[in-house]
Image (cartoon, helix red, strand yellow):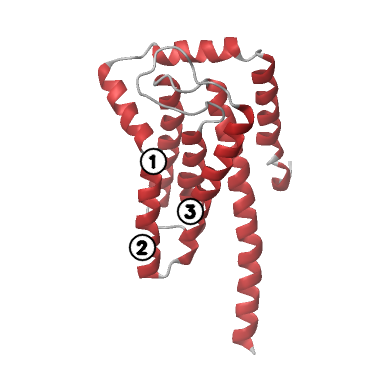
Amino acid sequence: MKKKYLILIPIIILILDIILILTGAIKPIDEFVYKIIISFKCDVLTEILKFITFLANTKTIVVFNVILVLFILLTKKTKLLLVTISSITSGITNKLIKHIFKRPRPTGLKLISQGGYSFPSGHTMISFLFYGMIIYLLYKHKVKYYKVFITLLAILMILVMISRIYLGVHYFSDIVGGACVGIIILSVLISLYKKYNKEWWYESSYNRCK
C-alpha cells in the first residue's frame, strides 16, 4: 500500500468506532477491556497512572508549550512551532467533536474527577499530537539518542491511553477515537509541513544560487 493511502486506515477505524458507539454495539468490548485493565488495580499503579495522565493534561501541555515557545524565541528553532500548532489544533478539534457527540463519561468507579464529555479522549489526542510531533521531529532530524527518546515517548503515549481507561474516565472506544483523530490530524500537519517546507527550501536554494 502506498504511503499516501495509509491515512485511510485510521479514518476507516474511526468511522467503524463511531458506528459501534452510536449503535451501542461497542458496549461489551468497552466493558471487557475495562475489566482487564482494572484487574491490575493497586495503590502504587494508581499513583503512577495518575502522574502519567497528568503529563497529557491540558494545563500541563499548555505549560510545556509556553516553555517551548520561550525556547524557540531564544534559539530560533522555528520548526519546533509544529509542536505548538499541533497542540492548539488538538484542543480545538477535540472540543468540537465532543460537543457534536456529547457522549457521557463512564458511570462506574472513577479514581479521579473529570468533567466534560467522553468521546473522543482529549488526553489521547493531545498525546498523539504533542508527543507524536516531537517523535516526528526527533526522527526527521536524527537528534542524538533519538531512538531512545522516541521509544520513551511512544511508551508514554501508550500509558496515557491505558491510564484513561484505568482511572475510569474513558471507555476503550473513546481512546480508539482519540488515537485515530490524533493520527489523522498529525498526518495532515506533517504532510503540509513537508509540502511547504520543500517549497521554502527550493526558493531559498534558488536565491542563494542567483
Q: Nearer the viewer, mark 1 or mark 2?
A: 2
Label number found at residue 70:
2
Q: Is residue 38 above or below residue 184?
A: above
Residue type at tag 3: Val
Q: Quadrant of residue 49?
A: top left
- Crowd band around label 3 with a 10 angstrom C-alpha radius: few (<14), some (14–19), many (20+): many
Q: Are marks 2 and 3 in contact (CB under 8 Å)?
A: no
Quarter of the image with the C terminus in it: bottom right
- Crowd band around label 1 with a 10 angstrom C-alpha radius: few (<14), some (14–19), many (20+): few
Report x, y in % for residue 103: 57, 23
Q: Quadrant of residue 54?
A: top left
Q: Give the spatial CA distance, label 1 vs label 2.
A: 24 Å
Mark toward the start of the polypeptide (3 vs 1):
3
Residue 182 appears in the figure: no
Label number found at residue 83:
3
Q: Give the spatial CA distance, label 3 vs label 1.
A: 17 Å
Quarter of the image with the N terminus in it: top right
Residue 78 appears in the figure: yes
Q: Is residue 188 shown left or right of residue 174? A: right
Furthest residue toward bottom: 210
Residue at position x 67%, y 29% from top? 13
Residue type at tag 2: Leu
Residue at position x 35%, y 19% from top? 111
Q: Is residue 94 shown left or right of residue 55? A: right
Q: Which residue is mark 1?
A: 152
